Amino acid sequence: MKIVLACDHAGYNLKKVISSCIESEGFEVLDVGTYSEERVDFPDFTAKACRAIQQGQAERGVIICGSGVGASIAANKFKGIYASICHDTYSAHQGVEHDNMNVLCLGGRVIGDELAKEIVKAFLAAKFSNEERFKKRLDKIYQFEKEGK
């Protein structure tokens, strides 16, 4: 599985750690920037990551900004992107298993390297459960997206 990885300046140092973690778990990384701590706007790099998923260049994504909140808000504006900020392992795997989350957002100024690596591992290892109750709920969400409401 290919994972798109993006960040703004506040997430740059954590992105380097996460990139190595993803590769050590046997996944390929598509790094769409940023590539330094020079100040940039997180929506630009969030868009690059989301478009990579929409275009089939990656199956999932990890986006890192200062808090993770802005990246999560921006990512969810893209059709077919189901993003959430997760700063614990339970939410990271449960978001995939129950909610078919395909983008994990992290706060580079909020969590440390070791916890971030564990969260990413939980996210990558998780698979959607395909249980009827979760599919039924997701169908409602997909309808919201279709209607634009």
Image (spheres, helix red, strand yellow):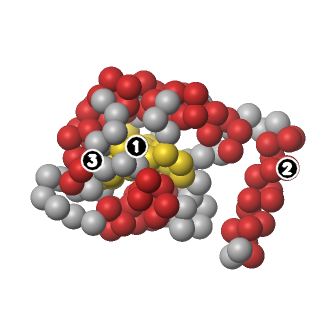
Judge by depth and name the residue closer to the eye, 68 or 34: 68
Label 1 and label 3: CA atoms lie apart by: 8 Å
Judge by depth and name the residue closer to the eye, 128 or 137: 137
Q: Is residue 19 above or below residue 53?
A: above
Residue 26, percent from left and from top: 40, 28
| Residue 116 shown left or right of residue 8 in the figure | right
Judge by depth and name the residue closer to the eye, 1 or 65: 65
Q: Is residue 26 above or below residue 137?
A: above
Label 3 and label 2: CA atoms lie apart by: 35 Å
| Residue 89 shown left or right of residue 146 in the figure | left
The answer to the question of whether label 1 and label 3 lie on touching residues, with beta carbons closer than 8 A, is: yes
Q: Name the secondary structure under disc 1.
A: strand
Q: Tell me which residue sits at (27%, 47%) in the image.
A: 11
Q: Name the secondary structure under disc 3.
A: helix
Mark 3 crowdedness (10 Å alpha carbons): few <14, some 14-19, many ≥20: many
The answer to the question of whether label 1 and label 2 lie on touching residues, with beta carbons closer than 8 A, is: no
**Badge 3 or badge 2: first in the primary sequence:** 3
| Residue 98 shown left or right of residue 26 in the figure | right
**The C terminus appears in which quarter of the rendering?**
bottom right
Q: Name the secondary structure under disc 2.
A: helix
Residue 21, percent from left and from top: 33, 29
At label 1, the amino acid type is Leu
At label 3, the amino acid type is Gly
Image mark for residue 11: 3
Residue 92, percent from left and from top: 54, 34
Query: Residue 48: in sight, yes or no?
Result: no
Image mark for residue 42: none
